[in-house]
Image (cartoon, grey):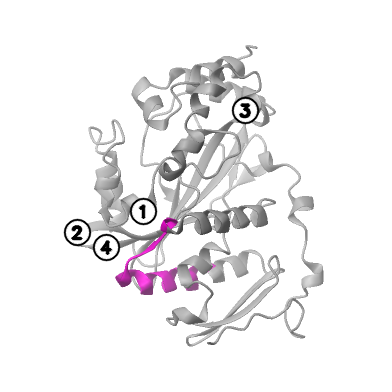
Amino acid sequence: MNVEMQSAGSSTDEIDFQEVPTFESEVPNRISGFPFPFRDDVYRYSTNVEPALQLVQTEAGSWGDRIIDIDSNYLEELNLRETVLRLDPTRLQVMSHMRPAAWDAITTVLPQMAATYPDIMKFERQGNQCRWQNGLQDIDLEFTVGADETLPEGPLHFLGSQIQDDIVLMDQREGSLWLDAGLVTFAADWSVGFDVGMRFLEIHGPVPRVHEERIITRAHQFLLRLQPGEQYRRTNWTMTVDRRLDTSTETYPEWGKDRTLVVDDPTLPDRLHLRVEVQHLIKLPATGALLFLVRTYLASLREIATVPEWRTRLGKVLEELPSDMAEYKGIDRYRNAAAHWLQGGD
């Protein structure tokens, strides 16, 4: 087994882990980097795909200038991911023909992380021999591309232990995209275990309005035309009660009742969170598989209200949202109460 786990600082020519910054001090306010998704007072589904790595200025700060975003929740969320996987191993799915794509993902994402955070991460590669250093986790690891046994738990699980994003891999064949692998622990009311092996168009079958307006069909055609190395992104949103990342179908009995109970709860502004996904879409260079990275951000209504423009806009969006869209997003029970509070009610 070619795995080497070394203690931090054991190498003399590499990262000085003593200088690793504390992200708690760098990011004192998570609102400053929150990807507030609304550019208008009315929301409707659209393809809303744009090139990745474009900085977006907001009323509170900015976001969007990196593929992998590490913040003060990094270690907490990775520990939560491991807990979810231990309790429910089905959250990790890799069909056998997707093993090369999983390695393609790891040799695409780790160099991105090293380039984005050069003071705390480093990636070296000579042929199939790689070395990965992550100062935030005290990791100094050597592995061989294509040899699953050289990474703890295999390539997709290991990649999921390094980034806060959920991971989905789609194969392209027979003129369609197929969800054939994924590590998804922070799903918003869906199940990777249920969707694995399904076509892209089948997965989006229940979404209201998008078929009549051919939004999903256009998105599918766009994704099929991506060229190796191209990187795009889009945002999506819903709402979640409490700061709960794991709202998967599997755990619905644990959180579903809160959608009703929160309506009359006087602490609604603190419990109810706007949940925004920044989804990066990357055509992998070696295999041609499509990599979806889904990073989830949460901000409570009270945090949103600290930015007056966001408070007003979110209130209007929730109030105007058509009932079928509110029902699909699972926010129909409490969205009027949320809109009322955001617009200055009690």
Query: Start and end of the magenta stretch?
Result: 90-109
Alpha-carbon span between mark 1 and mark 2: 23 Å
Residue 25, numbered circle: none
The tag earlier along the polypeptide, 3 or 1, is 1
Q: Is mark 2 on a helix, strand or loop?
A: loop
Q: Which amino acid does label 4 sit on?
A: Gln
Q: How crowded is mark 4: few (under 14 residues within 10 Å), some or many (20 or more)?
A: some
Q: Is mark 3 on a helix, strand or loop?
A: helix
The tag earlier along the polypeptide, 1 or 2, is 2
**Rendered position, 117 above or below 277:** below
Give 146 or 196, whichever is nearer the viewer.
196
**Nearer mark to the viewer, of 3 and 1:** 1
Q: Residues within 10 Å of mark 2 (few under 14, many from 20)?
A: few
Q: Do the residues labelled 4 and 2 touch (CB within 8 Å)?
A: no
Alpha-carbon span between mark 3 and mark 1: 32 Å
Residue at the disc numbered 2: 175
Residue at the disc numbered 3: 301
Residue 193, numbered circle: 1
Q: Is mark 1 on a helix, strand or loop?
A: helix
Q: In which quarter of the image is residue 342?
A: top right
Left or right: 44 as drawn, with respect to 39: left
Give 254 or 300, whichever is nearer the viewer.
254
Q: Which amino acid does label 1 sit on?
A: Gly
| Dominant SS in magenta | helix
Residue at the disc numbered 4: 172
